[in-house]
Amino acid sequence: MHPRLIISFVSVALTVTAGFAQNINQPTVDQLVSKNIEAKGGAAALKALQTLRLTGKMLVQQGQIELAYLEIKKRSDEVRTEASLQGMTQIEAYDGKEGWKVSPFFGRKDPERMSADDVKALVEDSEIDGPLVDWKAKGSTVEYLGTEDVDGTPAHKLKVVRKNGDVSFVYLDPDHFLEIRVVTQRMRHGAHEEVETDLGDYEQAGGVFVPTSIESGRKGASDKQRVIIDKVEANVPVDDSIFHFPASK
């Protein structure tokens, strides 16, 4: 055989072998989801977690303004957030079917129903377990895209396509397998929206690890809102009525 042909053959063989080895070493979606569940505390602990009450502060305008913050979640798919300043409280809530809000900082003190586009973020936030747990039952699809740098960390990147077509790229820490970043792409009022959320400072409550530092805003924006949770309470009694649109007085 001609020397050049031998060299070419060896090069191809090495390339194929390296690619095959790389594919073998790559984790599967099921493996990463399983590790994510275990990292959070395990399937049993997640299932036992029925409510979450998060209390802390929200920093906006590059930290110049601080608001008192409260978020309450309840299975299944109910959430309410409150941000308070100088006697006024911004409320956003979702009861599993519809969302509503009170916006006193914009001169609107009466509750208003939210549009289907505006409520999308609340629907995602209502997930106590996050987007990966029970993704098949939720009607989502998940694809592993390899690793990507997240502030110096080679994070595992998973693409989650939700039932409504919205896409979330979930980044898992390579050592602890908890979410450290989620980038969500969605259509909102006919325009493409991309929101980046960084998660950190996980603390355990009810046997489940919950992020207590959440920084979120449009991808690439310098001014993002930051939520710092000071207190996490698990399985506290929660009245369903706080999630529903208030009855007329």
Image: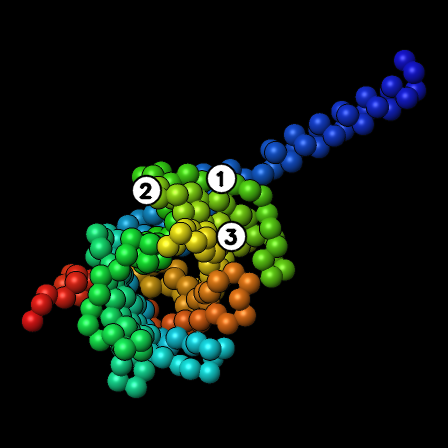
Residue at 49%, 39% in the rendered image = 143
Instruction: Please tell me how crowded label 1 is: few (under 14), some (14-19), or many (20+) other residues with Cα within 10 Å.
Output: some
Give the numbered dot on residue 171.
3
Q: 144 or 46, which lies in front?
A: 144
Pick out the residue farthest to the front: 190
Look at the numbered disc 3 and give the secondary structure of its residue.
strand
Cα gap from disc 3 to disc 2, whole angstroms: 19 Å
Residue 135 is left or right of residue 6, and the answer is left
Residue at 90%, 21% in the rendered image = 4
Could you say where residue 235 lies in the image, as x and y percent from the top left?
24, 62
> Image height check: is 119 above or below 159?
below
Residue ID for mark 1: 143
Residue ID for mark 2: 138
Look at the numbered disc 1 and give the secondary structure of its residue.
strand
Q: Of label 1 and label 3, which has the lower sequence position?
A: 1
Q: In which quarter of the image is residue 86?
A: bottom left
